Amino acid sequence: MSDVGPQQLARLLDEHGGALVLYARQWCSSAEDVVQDALVQLVRQERTPERIVAWLYRVVRNGAISAARAEQRRRHHETDAAARETPWFTMSDGDRLDAEAAQAALAQLPLEQRETIVARLWGGLTFDEIAELTGSSSSSAHRWYEAGLVALRQRLGVECPKKKSKLAT
Amino acid sequence: MSQEEIETGDLNAIAAALSSLSPSTGRLDRDRLMFLAGEAAARSNLAMPRLVPLHSAASNSAMAHELPPRMAARRWAWPVAFWTMSAVAATLLVVLVARPEPRVIERIVRLPAEPQVVVGTPAGAVVAPTNASERLEEAERGGAERPAHDRRTGDGDYLSLRDRVLARGIDSWTSGRSASNAALPEKTHNHRELLESVLESL
């Protein structure tokens, strides 16, 4: 069994549970079940992975893709509707963006861009880890990340900060 | 500032705004997850006991997690069987590949001669000729050497007569018969010959 104890498992759940659920939601509607299975699978591991967070994202990705295939076979339209109604973000007063608008804008991005943005922004993975996760190159992951942010910026109406001119400085 | 940060510097604002959003855990049940994790940990402990050195301080507490000998033996049974069968298969493969070519041994085998057919009585011990012509010559040569009873009724006389008839036709049988009858003066066949023989004896 791995050395992941209850305290570390609780810490992983607190720090990465929401991001992992959000990551799994890019494929399937049963994201919570996928994340739960991934965490239980982590406990079952004979040896603790070196990079636990990256390992969790990989397991969640595989589980979410499998769950998405199963959902596609079942063709439950109710499930899709329920998934759309489930909020991806928790509402709080300090948010600088409207959570629902961000969810809608994020949902419209291509899968590669969504996956990369979630893993980078909320998962804290490096581009190398994302490339390893998605089976692509680091430059591809970086390109998807930038393209996704540009699209989100346009849809959410967030203005770019003005660049400081070198001449002015 | 790294190259990566420089390239994404323009998008820091939107990235920071998005990062301020907290992803929802949704229906992820913390209590249920902890229960399942504990259950999984317990099953893992049962399935794969750790080897704890005897001198370690935690050996006493770890002993509680060790499997009974029967379960431990069952756990090792399949791997041992697998590796044993693999070793046997590999050995047989090596033997099959490294098997030498079969040696060809030339040996002269002397077969016994064909059994000879002995014709006549054991006292006479006449060896039957192998073909018809030899048998015919033998019959012609040794007709007088045979005993009287054999000359009349013996099997050898029949065989020689048969060979003679087959080789020279039916005339040879009658001539041979008259020749053999000439050797028996006391035996007559008709009354004329009997009369002549009586007159000659007078």
Image (tube, rainbow, N blue to C red):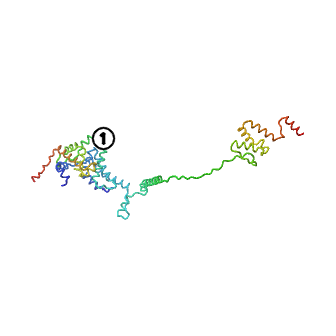
The residue at the far left in this view is A168
**Is residue A93 in sight in this rendering?**
no
Q: Is residue B13 above or below residue B53?
A: above
Chain ID of residue with mark 1: A
Read off the residue under disc 1: A72
Residue B137: horizontal and vertical position, in percent? 72, 43
The residue at the far bottom in this view is B55
Q: Nearer the viewer, residue A21 or B178?
A: B178
Residue B15: horizontal and vertical position, in percent? 19, 49
Q: Which of A127 and B164 is in front in this view?
A: B164
Q: Residue at x 81, y 40 (%)?
A: B182
Residue A154: horizontal and vertical position, in percent? 17, 44
Local packing at callout 1 (Cα closer than 10 Å; few below 14, some 14-19, many 20+) is few
Taking the image as shown, residue A35 lies to the left or right of residue B160, namely left
Taking the image as shown, residue B77 lies to the left or right of residue B24, namely right
Residue B146: horizontal and vertical position, in percent? 77, 45
Amino acid marked by disc 1: Gln
Q: Nearer the viewer, residue B185 or A144?
A: B185
Q: In which quarter of the image is the N terminus of chain A?
A: bottom left
Taking the image as shown, residue A72 lies to the left or right of residue B168, namely left
Q: Which of A40 and B61 is in front in this view?
A: A40
**Is residue B66 in sight in this rendering?**
yes
Number of callouts: 1
Quarter of the figure with residue B183: top right
Q: Residue at x 37, y 65 (%)?
A: B55
Q: Which residue is drawn at 75% across and 36% down?
A: B171
